[in-house]
Amino acid sequence: MAIAFGLTVLTMAYAIGYISGCHLNPAVSVGLVVGKRFPASDLLAYVVAQVIGARLALQFCT
C-alpha cells in the first residue's frame, strides 16, 4: 500500500512538477527546502495552504 501511494506522488511530480513546482503535500515542500530548491521563507505559507486545502477537500468529498 505504501508503495502505491509513493508511486502516485512520484507520477504526479513528473506530470505537474514543471508547472507548479509540485507542492503536493507538506513533505514535498519541506523536501524542496532541504534540497535548497525552494526558499525557506515561503515554507510556512505553503504548508498552511496545503493543510487548509486538504481539510476542505476532506470535508466536501466525504
Image: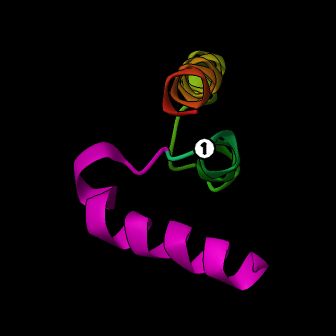
- Residue with the most extreme right position: 2
In the rendered structure, which amino acid carries the disc numbered 1?
Asn
Residue name at image x 64 percent, y 71 percent? 5
Secondary structure of the residue carrying tag 1 is loop
Which of 18 and 10 lies nearest the eye of the viewer? 10
Residue range highlighted in magenta: 1-23
Q: How are the residues colored?
A: rainbow
Which of 60 and 20 lies nearest the eye of the viewer? 60
On screen, residue 23 versus residue 27, left or right, reads left
- Which quarter of the rendered picture does the N terminus lie within? bottom right
Which of 34 and 57 lies nearest the eye of the viewer? 57
Q: Assign the magenta stretch its main secondary structure.
A: helix
Is residue 16 covered in magenta?
A: yes
Provide residue 56's location: percent of width, then percent of height: 54, 19
Q: Is residue 39 above or below residue 7?
A: above
Which of 4 and 42 lies nearest the eye of the viewer? 4
Provide residue 13's location: percent of width, then percent of height: 42, 65
Provide residue 6's location: percent of width, then percent of height: 64, 74
On screen, residue 59 versus residue 23, left or right, reads right
Residue name at image x 60 percent, y 30 percent? 58
Label 1 CA crowd tier, 10 Å (few <14, some 14–19, many 20+)? some
Q: Is residue 8 above or below residue 33?
A: below
- Residue with the most extreme left position: 19
Q: Which residue is mark 1?
A: 25
